[in-house]
Image (cartoon, coloured by chain):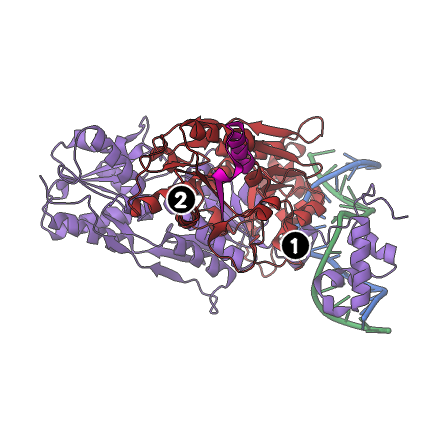
Chain colours: A red, B purple, C green, D blue
Amino acid sequence: MPRSPTPRRRATLASLAAELKVSRTTISNAYNRPDQLSADLRERVLATAKRLGYPGPDPVARSLRTRKAGAVGLMITEPLNYSFSDPAALDFVAGLAESCEEAGQGLLLVAVGPSRDVGDGTAAVLAAGVDGFVVYSASDDDPYLAVVRQRHLPVVVVDQPMDVPGASRVCIDDRAAMRELAEYVVGLGHREIGLLTMRLGRDRPAGEVGAAVADPQRLQTPHFHVQRERIAGVVDAITAAGLARDSLTVVESYEHLPTSGGAAAEVALSANPRLTALMCTADVLALSAMDYLRGRGIYVPGHMTVTGFDGVPEALRRGLTTVAQPSVEKGRRAGRLLHQPPRSGLPVVDVLDTELVRGRTSGPPA
Amino acid sequence: MPRSPTPRRRATLASLAAELKVSRTTISNAYNRPDQLSADLRERVLATAKRLGYPGPDPVARSLRTRKAGAVGLMITEPLNYSFSDPAALDFVAGLAESCEEAGQGLLLVAVGPSRDVGDGTAAVLAAGVDGFVVYSASDDDPYLAVVRQRHLPVVVVDQPMDVPGASRVCIDDRAAMRELAEYVVGLGHREIGLLTMRLGRDRPAGEVGAAVADPQRLQTPHFHVQRERIAGVVDAITAAGLARDSLTVVESYEHLPTSGGAAAEVALSANPRLTALMCTADVLALSAMDYLRGRGIYVPGHMTVTGFDGVPEALRRGLTTVAQPSVEKGRRAGRLLHQPPRSGLPVVDVLDTELVRGRTSGPPA
DNA sequence: CTGAAAGCGCTAACAT
DNA sequence: ATGTTAGCGCTTTCAG
């Protein structure tokens, strides 16, 4: 009569070996190197394993021994549930997931809400059993980034920050892309332009909520390289066109909510009612701004030109003028860089192409 | 002069202990139980750690010892990149991620593409260092599910399959929800109804591609409980209304692509041109079907009633008549069930509420 | 093809 | 408050 399939003490490789009166090596080989033992013996091992309810070598113990976790960690600074509402971020995750799947690796989403205390020794970033990290769009001074770096694991950065020694980076040329878009907008004749951007720093100025015009000082402390570059791109275009710097009204959104774009648009328009174009550093911002404008009876592009950035499906569907960037491919590349590091061992910077999409939300000023 | 921050051999807890001439326990305590040693000593430990580039206790070794991985695995049968294109699945993941974040746990996306060989000992499911699994909508006979169960870890099932011994389950009453929707459609006067459904089995009938009418035999072998129940719900309504069983044309879509709904609609309409309503077991199917219909000049709801299932944002925005289910909440509950198992230790079944959404895509037959 | 020995890096009891 | 002891479960040389 067969023994109970669930012995009190969970079966281990050792107990299986004892049961079969063979060495642990043999059991290990049965799982990891089938060619190292007779098919017959292997068969017996597997059968006994099933009988004893042995699930195969413990992944954690194996990881300890082999120094391979079989997974990569994805560090996102935003709360996870926000990231899941930004289609661009999502596409990125999908691309990364795809490359992990190909490589037979797991993808560990690391909980790095801004709320969590870094000092906490149990921080998930520290606890993650992974072979490397992908850092998605972190601020220059993200404390978690420091923690990740400390672990001495391979790191691939996506978008930002720029300067992580030893880390490869996948990005686009944000400045050039935004400049091209701004040149197009300026070329249409716009002279009073609003620029709605995401958070410029991890902090927010004391007492501020929602969105506010970013004063020059705020623009000097940009902890997010990407936003900085995109703003610079617009300034480049404006300057090149001989316009005054103050034809540009920059509004920073502190929150990343579905309605943030509308709120920022409102702030921009009350700061400068003569705006004829709203450029946004993300499609989600632009789409929300459009919803807001429609609610106010301001027609796009008749009364107001609106542009975005990212080229997410919904934006393209709605004809938004924007810069399309290959978010999915970013994810794939980031994964690949981790799974198959460059032969040289030196970090690489992978700059992907973007494309200006002239949609139906831009036109000459009224 | 301080030593090089990167010694050839990576610093370990033991080497730190040696350096400081204290026991390993003390170092361990410095990280895990700050209250167990003098603040002073702890300070010294941390300083030396920094000097030696010691990143803190190795997560894998700690996991082995404590038997906690600090992460839960999410097993999705579909390829990951598909899942990232279904908003309902995505919402679910977002909810799960949220609850993991709350619990300070990581979320490991396990690569379980249909392509991977289960026999492969390196299957990611086996290799995942996790404390439990969430199984999202797997077929009754999913081979990976068997593998997961073998690991003797806590398992929470979402939607399906029904019968996983020992596993809690989060679900909705698919049959009742679909029946209510079908009653509404029948109540509008429809007598020839098409039902477009996702895959009914892991396999597909030999030689089939795209979509095909599901014959009675195929309807007998439903490896997906959810689809089965939803179909049953429609049949319930039809039967209750005194209609013949053959007023219903069931079409099964074998692929899960953005255009699958349209393809299935085409199949349904050529199988029975007199259809006046297309009910779909997923919003993504319905939305695609609507696109198809529009392309053919078939107006909704004038010429054709279309209904969906899930209540994803885009569907609600487009006014689809559908059943809204709380996908995000499903994810949260699943996570919670894993992180805070019921006191009793007994598996629970958590049936969430759904809501019939009477949109603008349903009306009386032409 | 199989086995014996030696840890991987850590923490949990249990002293002291 | 700190140290000692004893593994967690596995893989990997290296010999037979």
Say which mark, if any, is on residue B141. 2
Residue A14's x, y, as percent? 68, 50
Camera-side residue: B130 or A198? A198
Q: Secondary structure at mark 1?
A: helix
Q: Secondary structure at mark 2?
A: loop
Magenta residue span: A230-252
Q: Is residue A80 visible?
A: yes
Q: Is A60 located above or below residue B208 in the figure?
A: below
Q: Is B181 located above or below residue B197 in the figure?
A: below
Local crowd at mark 1 within 10 Å, few (<14), some, or many (≥20)? many
> Which residue is at a point 51% across and 60% down the rendered structure image?
B339
The numbered mark, 2 or 1, whose residue comes first in the sequence reads: 1
- B104 relative position to B197: left or right: right
Camera-side residue: A259 or A136? A259
Alpha carbon separation for disc pair 2 and 1: 31 Å
> Which residue is at a point 38% across and 54% down the rendered structure image?
B163
